[in-house]
Every structure is written in C-alpha cells, then in structure tokens.
Image: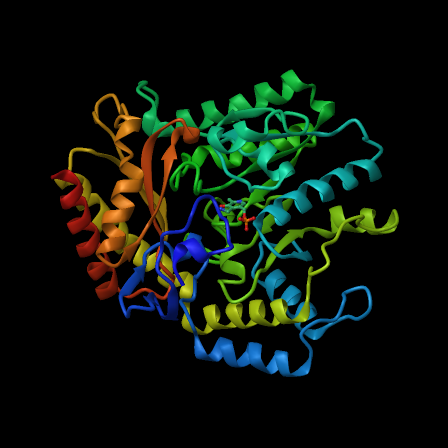
Amino acid sequence: MSNEASYLFYQSRNPRPFLDRGEGIYLFDENGKRYIDGSSGAMVSNIGHSNPRVLAKIKAQMDRATFGYRLHFRTHPSEDLAAKTVSLMPAGLDRVFFVSGGSEAVESAVKLARQYALTQGQPQRYKVISRFPSYHGCTFGALDLTGYDPLREPFAPMLAGMPKVPAPATYLDRDNLTEEARGLKYAELLRDQIVQEGPENVLAFVMEPVGGASTGALVAPDSYYGRVREICDEFGVLLIYDEVMTGAGRTGKFLAAEHWGITPDIVAMSKGFGAGYAPLGAIVAGKRLVEPVLDAGGFQHGFTYAGNPLACAAGLAVLEEMEEQGLVENAARMGKVLMAELESLMERYPFIGDVRGKGLLTAFEFVSDRNTMAPLPVGLDAHTRLVELAYARGLIIYSRRTRGGTSGDHFLVAPPLIITEPQIRDMMAILRDAIEAFAQ
Ligand code: PMP
C-alpha cells in the first residue's frame, strides 16, 4: 500500500516502511531490512520484542477472557499485577490504580492528589507546579504541566496555566558553584515558587526524576532530590514522580526514585511497564492518601479499559520476565558500557557538547561551541538529520529539540534492557558511522 492510500494521520504523513516483525532488540521491515531498536520505540520495549514466554502468557489469558469490566468483576491478572508492582516499590507505596498510558497516569495522579486534598479540608489547594523543560503527556491536563513550547503553543492558553520552575540543567550553567550547591539552588527555586503561589494553594509538584523526551536524559545533582522532598513536606505539597519513562527498570533501578532513596507520594508509570505488549500504565500511592479518598466515597475517576485482564496479564508477564532475566541489574551494568561508549564519541566529535543519563536512559547533545554550550543553528535541523542517517543504516534513535523545544538538538539512546555488551558495540558502531556522515 502506498502512502497516498493511507487513511491514517499522525504528526505528519508517514514515510516509514511497513513493520514486519520484531525479535529481541531487532525490528524488521517488510523488505527484510533489520533495525536495532536503539530507543525501544519511545522507551517502551524494555524486555525486547516478541518474547515467546510473555506471548504464551498473554495467549493463555486471551483464551479465558479478554475483557471484564472492573466494576463488574475482580480479576486475578489485575490483583496479581498490583501485588507484584507493590512488591517492587519503596515501602509505603502500596495502592495501585491501573490506566492505559502515560498521559492518563499523570492526570490520574493529579486527580488523586486533588481528591485527597478535599478529604483533608483543603479545597483551595489546586495549583500543580511542574518544571521547564519537561514532558508529561499530550492530553490537555498533562500538556498543561508539560514544559515544551512547540507542543504547548498551538493549544494555549489551555487550562489554568500551571506555574513552572526550571529543571536543573546544570550542564548549561557557567557559575563557580559545586554540583551540590547547584542542586540545592534549583531546589530553592521550587521553594520560592511555592511561597510565591501561596503554599496553601499548592497541591503538588510533578517531576521526571531523570528527564526524557524534553530534556534528553537530564539528571539533577544528587543534592536536588532530597531537598525537593523536604520542601514538599515543609508545605504539605504532594510530590508526584512521573516515572512513565524511567520506571520499570530503565535507569538501572526499578524506580529512578530509588537512586536517591526518595519515596514520592504518587508515582506514575507506563511505557516499560507494559513494555509494548499492552497499553498499560499505573499510579501507585500509599494507603495514607488512598484510604481517605475511598472513605469519602471513592476515587471519582476511571477509564473504561483501566485494569482490563488482558493488559494486566501482559504487564504481569513482563515483570516476571524482568525478574527472571535480572533486567534491572542488566540495565545498570549495560548503562555503564553505553555511557563509556558515548563519552568516547564525545572525545572524538567537538560538536557533542554533553553526554548524560542513568542506566539505559542516555543521551547526547549537539552544540556549536562547548565552552558556551551555544546550540547548533535551528535551521540545520540536526536532530532530524542524524536520526535519518542512523535509520538508513539500520539504527533507531530518538531525538528532540532540547531546552524546552526552543533550540538545540539532543538524542536519546535507550535500547531494550535485554541488550548485551556485543550488541551495544554493534549499535555504537552504526551510530558512529551516522555521526561521521553527519560531520561531512
Ligand atoms: N510522562 C513522561 C515522562 C513521558 O516520557 C511520556 C511519553 N513520552 C508521557 C508522560 C506520556 O505518555 P503517553 O504518551 O503514553 O501518554
């Protein structure tokens, strides 16, 4: 079928070849060309493609029942997946609500926070502070929390216009502070914002613990995380971690929050949680938040497909597979190999201004000058050009303009967590070749 005959529309007309099949870290198009899935789709396919054990478990559930509405039946897959999820969480996060995707998870987290505030007699708490740059989803509520201009502008003024504080992009800072002091400086910007908004009006602060699409795997200084937790506690502001991209092992811990010993009030997950085997997401919160909401008549929220047994059976099979193969540990180990490879690329190409990340969520950023970190000219469209050069060579990577979508080019390298060291070397050889072609 030619593209002209397509009835679909996405961001643009779709020039890509038809997908035929997947196997492990590879995808094959209908012409038989092989691609390394160097971005796990959009950081989704954590356990790789077409895992036969997972497929068998999904098929077994299909043969029993594909759908049972959650208000009509409890189902074993949803109960079992909830129990498994809680077993992987920091202590105190022990209640689960399923959704079908990341935007839904973020909005569900905010609605849970809001209903909790009502049970506490605090109806005036409605403001949700987020960061700039950030990405939290494409539905109106999640988009209003998103700090990425090109995605926001067509729909402005959206809902209420939520306040934003800078995400700690310390790699761009040219001050004399230590990393620790920089982390604390950015945390204090949150405190200032809460004070300015009137702490009694602030419901929640939402952040990606490691940035994703909007920032390119931005990691804050260690000092930032604990101080943000303290500031939220000081003012009774709920801390929501958007772990849609970072959750389910991507950064080398099951939740990225674990790297800093943080227990958020609510965690939003999706992407790797269903790992491409089902549209699936979840929010996880503690009894402390959830029980008062249930006592007050229940969470007034829910999507038709939330917690359906087929998606939950897939999610459970994914988590079991991750455990059996030790994929969280593999992400931590392979993340180090990948980072060393990226650092050697940076030594070789002066227009790579920064490499960063955690586990298998890594990125590199192009600049025109490493001293000033001035970006390449927007007109060069480096972020789309390099992606095409890699694609032609059989490697899929994920790129965006950085700095909130206003300029710059960053590239996410985030292969499935099953990747091996020789496969990383193969992937990086293709990437080096594509960058070499870009440099010509
Ligand atoms: N939050 C984060 C951190 C994300 O990376 C994404 C997806 N890129 C979303 C939310 C939205 O998820 P979805 O596209 O599944 O709605």
Question: Which residue is at 38% across, 65% downward?
Answer: 19
Percent position (x, y) of residue 164?
A: 56, 25
Location of residue 99 with respect to 84 vertically, above or below: above
Percent position (x, y) of residue 26?
A: 32, 66
Location of residue 171 with respect to 384 vertically, above or below: above
Question: In the visual, does 64 lie left or right of 156?
Answer: right
Image quarter of the C terminus: top left
Task: Please identify the quarter of the rendering in which residue 252 is found.
Answer: bottom left
Percent position (x, y) of residue 301?
A: 76, 49
Residue lying furthest top: 196
Question: Which residue is at 14% across, 45% downward?
Answer: 437
Question: Which residue is at 45% across, 33% downward?
Answer: 223
The one of 320 and 215 positioned closer to us in this rendering:
215
Question: Which residue is at 21% across, 27% downward?
Answer: 368
Location of residue 132 with respect to 289 vertically, above or below: above
Question: In the visual, does 324 lie left or right of 194?
Answer: left
Task: Please identify the quarter of the rendering in which residue 61 is found.
Answer: bottom right
Question: In the visual, does 237 lie left or right of 417?
Answer: right
Percent position (x, y) of residue 331?
A: 37, 59
The one of 184 and 95 positioned closer to us in this rendering:
95
Image quarter of the N terminus: bottom left
Q: In the rendered view, how is the structure colored?
A: rainbow
Marker count (numbered): 0
Asked if one can make out residue 386 in the rendered structure from this viewpoint, the answer is: yes
